Structures are given as C-alpha cells and as structure tokens.
Image: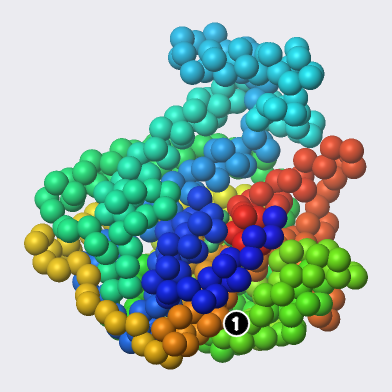
Amino acid sequence: MFRGFEGILRGRDPLDAQQITQRICGVCPISHGLTSVQCLEDAFGIQPCDNGRIEQNLILLANYIQSHIIHFYHLAALDFVDITAILSYSGKDSVMQQLKSWVSTCLARKDLFPAAPFLPRFEGDYIADKDVNCHLIHSYVKAFEARGIAHEMGAVFGAKLPHSTSIVPGGCTQEVTMERILAYTTRLNKLKAFCEDVYLPDVIAAAGIMPEHWGTGKGYDNFLSFGVFRTNAEGDKYIPPGVVINGKWEAFDPKYITEQVGFSRFSSQSDLHPFDGETSPAPHKENAYSWLKAPRYKGHPMEVGPLSRVMVNVLSPEDNWIKKAATKVLNAHSLKAQQLNSVLGRHLVRALEAIWLIPYAYESLDQLAIGKKTALPLSIPDKAQGAGFCEAPRGALGHWINIEKKKIANYQCIVPTTWNCSPKDDAGVIGPIEKSLIGTPIPDPKQPLNSGRVVRAFDPCLACAVH
Ligand code: NFE
C-alpha cells in the first residue's frame, strides 16, 4: 500500500524525521530511526558522543535479533515445517495443546480458513518426520518469548519498542546506569542461549532435511552493504560496507545510487540520485507493475541483506572478522561461498549473524561510561544536505535530506526490500528476487511452494519497500 512517507515529511521540522520514518515499519523501526538520525547528523555537521553511539548500536542490535528470529520462525519456517504434524502431539505443553486444537479446528472448519494464520497453504514436500516437525513447532512457540525478550532489551536504551523515543541526532536520551546495563545483560544472556541452542540448530536441521535448497534461489552475484554499527567518530563500522558486482569487490560510494521508475507507478523523472529524488505517485501508469522504484548501483540491480553483509566481506581484499568467521563455518559444513547464494544460504547467514552479534553486544556494554553524557546540543541549520547509511536487518538502508529555511524541503528513503523486490529498470533488467525465481523447480504449478521459499528467504517487507 502506497503511504507516501516522503510527502508526509516535506515541510516539517527535520527533528520529526526520525520519529515519522520509524512508522514506516514495526519490524525494523530502529534502522529507520538511526538512518534518519545519521542523515540529520550529517546535515547538522555533528557526530554522536561515545555513550550515545554505543546506546544506538545496542538498541539496533536488539532489533536485529528480534527481526532475525521473527523471520525464521514466524515468517518463513512454515514453508518447511508441516504444521498439521501437531495433530500427533501428545506432550503436556499447554501452548502446544492449544495450537493443536486450533489447527484441528482449521482443518474441520473450512469456513475459518481465511482467518487462520496456518491454513490454507500450498501443499507440497514439507518435512515428513513428525517428531522433527513437532520439535520445530515447539521452537516456533518459544520464539515468541524470545522476541519479547529482545524487544524488552531494546527498550532498555530505546525507552520503548517497537518505536523508540530516545534516539536523537548526536546520541540517545537514556542515561547510562548500572541498572540499565544489568537489565540489558540479563536479557542478552537469554537470547544468547536461544540463538545458540535453538535458532541455529533448527536452521541447520531444516537445511539437512532439504539440501536441494542449497541449489534454489540463486540471484545475481551483485551484493551491496552500507556497513553498520559505528565503532568510532571516524565512521568505521563493526560490519564494514562494500560492493560486489558480478562477483568482483569494490569500495562503496553513495554517488552511484539512483532510482529508476520505467516500470514503477510513479510519474517522477527516472534515474535520479536520491538528493534530487521525486516521489510522484501515478497509480494508473501504463506498463507499470510495482509501487517500488527500481534502485540501481552503477546501473546494476543489487541484492542486500545478511547474505550481502557476508559476501562483501568474504570477497573484500581486507582481512576482517566476518571473513574469518564465515570461512570457519563454510569449512565445518563443507560448503563453498557461492552456495550461500541460495535459499538455505540466506537462512543460514541470518542465523549466524544473530550469534556473531552477541559478543559485540557484551563488548559494547563494557564500553558504556556510567554517568557520562549520552547526547549533544544541536542546532538546525537554515540550509543543508545530509545522507545516512545504515544496515537494517534486511539490508542496506539510506535516507537523504535537503533542509531549507530549517524545514525539510525533500526527503528520500531507499529501503532494503526496495532493492531486493525491485521491478524491472528502464532497460528492462529484472530485480534481484525476480532473477532468483528463474529456474526454480515448480513440480505442480497449482502449488508453487518453492516460489514462496525463494522469495521469503530474502525476508521481504513490503510495508518498508513501498512506504
Ligand atoms: Ni519493514 Fe525493513 C528491514 C527496513 S525492509 S522490515 O530490515 O528498512 O525493507
């Protein structure tokens, strides 16, 4: 659904931007808030103080873990898990028993189908083993609790979640106290256990049962990452940025980003850099088939997301911790880096990222300075331009602002799913998910289960993509 956030922002106080853009989505609001704040910091000519920067990272990190868990269990797992296997559940867990009764009601009452979250579904080659299914359904239920813990953890420094009220250009308004550090740490301990003992083993178990999906969903060999988690005032990032085009690494330069609208429902001029971007909806435009613009880097469609964050670092000429960690996992599972460009590869690197970020969270908590300032004074310039580059859980997120007379004159967001779900560009070149669908085996065209598996492995969010 087109909402027109860019239009909503025009004419407003620049400080409203990080509150309004967080409303683009309830799943990744922190990424929008932080990208907006970085965009404003760039326009205001300020850098966050250390405490504020670390708090921002910790809020985002909590949102990453929440988002990765929701994706695997609540958005994608039922592409693999046979939910009807719960009918054979004979254990005592009360939530599992309730679920069993609901699924059995859904099967008996066909008239309830449109309202049910689990059925109807495409029929096909779900996991056959009933015990494995029941184990994964149990994890599905536990994952709700884990997501709740992650939201609480983000709210420690974010003041509330989903939509944080504490993030500001230059830092964060939550003071650093021992109570807050402990509140975050106790929740992090629980999430560490969930990610290590449940999430990653479940992904590996599902992959072991359906190894054919190492070979489905291959996209372009084009990967883009803006890098994320600022480690200092110089702009270094814990997950470094990078670009891979046709398998070849290069450094990221924001000047190469444009958006094309040849097949998009916009009458705006095509191929504009976001500083000059326009958002003029044209619902009835001939040949247009999407509310998404087609973002391009040097004219190429680019995949974004956890896989891109890994690939730009694995293929980087620089040594870095991601390359080391990824190589270790690839060797342990006898996999080649190219095999990650697949349905299972996208699920695996997402789960790995959740685990890899946990030691960084502990390290960041240690760096907080109790009682020291968390934000800086700021003033809004009469006229300025700024850009913010961050990584949302689903990939590269950029915001661009033009300020005139202390108000927002233009604001543009290019969002991860806009990259991944991009329609054709002006030259008719298809987007990354379109590309990854080609060649997908669909044994029964009436039950295109595999197409759902390919698309959902990217973790698309259309609310974000269209905004
Ligand atoms: Ni609505 Fe989002 C993430 C952003 S996806 S979830 O992650 O930004 O386009």
Ligand 1 quarter of the rendering: bottom right
**Residue at label 1?**
274
Using residue 365 as the reference point, say whether residue 162 is left or right of it: right
Residue located at (61% from left, 87% from top) = 276
Position of 397 relative to 181 (above/below) = below
Direction left: furthest residue: 371
Rate crowding at label 1 as few (under 14), some (14 to 19) or many (20 or more) other CA atoms within 10 Å: many
**Could you say which quadrant of the image residue 115 lies in?**
top right
Q: Which residue is rendered at x = 34% and y = 48% of the image?
A: 160
Relative side of 376 to 76, left or right: left
The answer to whether residue 240 is seen in the rendering is no
- Above or below, 220 against 278 in this view is above
- Quadrant where the N terminus sits is bottom right
Looking at the picture, how far across and down is residue 139, in whole percent? 49, 30
Task: State the quadrant of the C terminus.
Answer: bottom right
Residue type at tag 1: Pro
Residue 204 placed where, x, y %? 53, 42
Total of numbered circles in the picture?
1
191 lies above or below 50: above
Looking at the image, residue 61 sits to the left or right of residue 331; the answer is: left
| Residue 26 seen | yes
Q: Locate residue 286, reporting x and y percent.
A: 90, 70
Task: State the scheme by which the image is colored.
Answer: rainbow
Observer-nearest of 215 and 116: 116
Depth check, front residue: 141 or 43 = 43
Question: Residue 220: x percent and y percent?
Answer: 71, 69
The residue positioned 44% from the left and 87% from the top of the image is 405
